[in-house]
Image: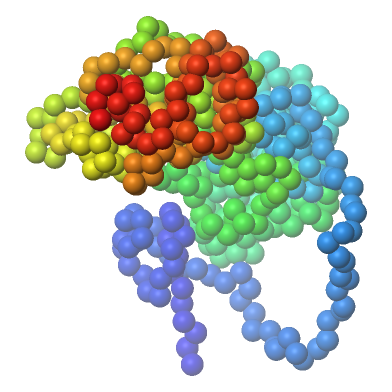
Amino acid sequence: MAKSKTFVCSSCGASFSKWSGRCEACGEWNTISEEVPLSSGPASKSLGARRGSAVKLTDLSTQEAPPPRAASGLDELDRVLGGGLVPASAILVGGDPGIGKSTLLLQAAAAFARKGLKTVYVSGEEASAQVRMRAQRLELADAPVRLAAETNLRDILTTLEAEKPQLVIIDSIQTMWADNVDSAPGSVTQVRATAHELTTFAKRHGVSVVMVGHVTKEGQIAGPRVVEHMVDTVLYFEGERGHQFRILRAVKNRFGPADEIGVFEMTGTGLAEVVNPSALFLSERGQPTPGSVVFAGIEGTRPVLVELQALVAPSPHSQPRRAVVGWDNARLSMILAVLEARCGIPFAGLDVYLNVAGGLKISEPAADLAVAAALLSAREDVAIPAETVVFGEISLSGALRPAPQTENRLKEARKLGFTAAIVPAGGKIGSGGGLQLTRPADLTGFVGDIFGAG
């Protein structure tokens, strides 16, 4: 019986039983190729043919010391890592081209090297001279970082075994090439094989390995999703090129909290840490204008205040536009539908634009009420008071649900000089942070209290 072949899309990782010119999953052209098995030898015999070794079992009450951590001195990076770098860990860092991944990791390599960790930086995309030029521009040329420009994985692993570093940075995983895999660099098979080899090397030798991954046009790390399952930590470096802010977000972390963020500012000499992100995101906010609302959010364990901006204008088209930057487009449609169905406020025939100032991306449902406030403020041409923060979740019935960590959000708002807050009724607020609270029970009550309609 002939062995069936598998064809895989190098863009999204979808698999097919036959080749085609266009991927049905992501729509890309000429990205499908035959996947060559990692081992071309005969299939192994049944596991029952021989007995294995007994595995040691323990109970859940076994006490083990927490893993040691190495701090870089970059507090924002250490926060996202969960307190520092853990030995024998594999970390995957993704981000848009030109967002600053190489700059961040070169700064991190220099910081760890200056703290005493033996660090090796392997570049597969740039020549050594280019990396040295960047280091000079960032004033890192004196850092004791060992540098190499190589893509052959076998040569890299042989060098690392001889050098015995404590931290290895691979930039990037898509450029690495394993000579035992009959596939082009950057293909799904190559990415999976090289990531597996590097992760295994990290665990076997107690080395921390950081791998840079390219992202697709949808913003996901390119290659098979199994790579994200292999590693211990997955970080995304986010931001808009038009803004100087950069967000390092942990979406997976086996050694710390997920969804933690670190905030950096892009400067002429590299990335600078932002100690108080809320103050930075609100620094360019002027006088209160219709459509501008301050949302008190939570990113990981950190409360962050950010400005939401909305614009509502008559549409010249039969199909009004719905444009969103930094928030979920589908959730915006839901908020508009609830406002029309439960409050009788239509947005038909109106273009709606929503923007999260500063380039931050918000995903928590607690932003629902702030978005609704911004939309109504823009539609009615009524400004929300500048010293007021808004947060809360909106259900499809029009009810308002309290957001988690309400007390921490209010404390952060009070610290930055805000005097009032609009939050849903219910939920623990403690002392309220000394703010004047407006607590509507549902969306209709919110519209009536704030805009005098309902």
Is residue 355 positioned above or below 204 on the image? above
- Can residue 102 be seen by looking at this rendering? no
Q: Report whether 253 appears left or right of 219.
A: right
Colour scheme of the rendered structure: rainbow
Q: Report whether 210 appears left or right of 362.
A: right
Is residue 293 positioned above or below 351 on the image? above
Tell me which corner region of the image, top left, top right, bottom left or bottom right, holds residue 17: bottom left
Task: Please report the residue visible at 36 percent of the width from the left and 16 percent of the height from the top.
Answer: 384
Image spot of residue 324 (x, y percent): 33, 34
In the image, 246 versus 197, the foreground residue is 246
In the image, 424 versus 383, the foreground residue is 424
Image spot of residue 86 (x, y percent): 78, 42
Q: Report whether 294 appears left or right of 124.
A: left
Task: Please report the residue visible at 79 percent of the width from the left and 54 percent of the height from the top.
Answer: 203
Q: How many marks?
A: 0
Task: Please report the residue visible at 51 percent of the width from the left and 22 percent of the height from the top.
Answer: 305
In the image, 175 versus 334, the foreground residue is 334
Task: Please report the residue visible at 39 percent of the width from the left and 24 percent of the height from the top.
Answer: 308
- Can residue 293 be seen by looking at this rendering? yes
Tell me which corner region of the image, top left, top right, bottom left or bottom right, holds residue 178: bottom right
Q: Report whether 360 appears left or right of 263.
A: left
Image spot of residue 264 (x, y percent): 58, 23
Say which quadrant the C terminus sits in: top left
- For this orientation, the residue located farthest to the top is 287
In the image, 131 versus 10, the foreground residue is 10
Image spot of residue 415 (x, y percent): 60, 14
Is residue 20 positioned above or below 406 on the image? below
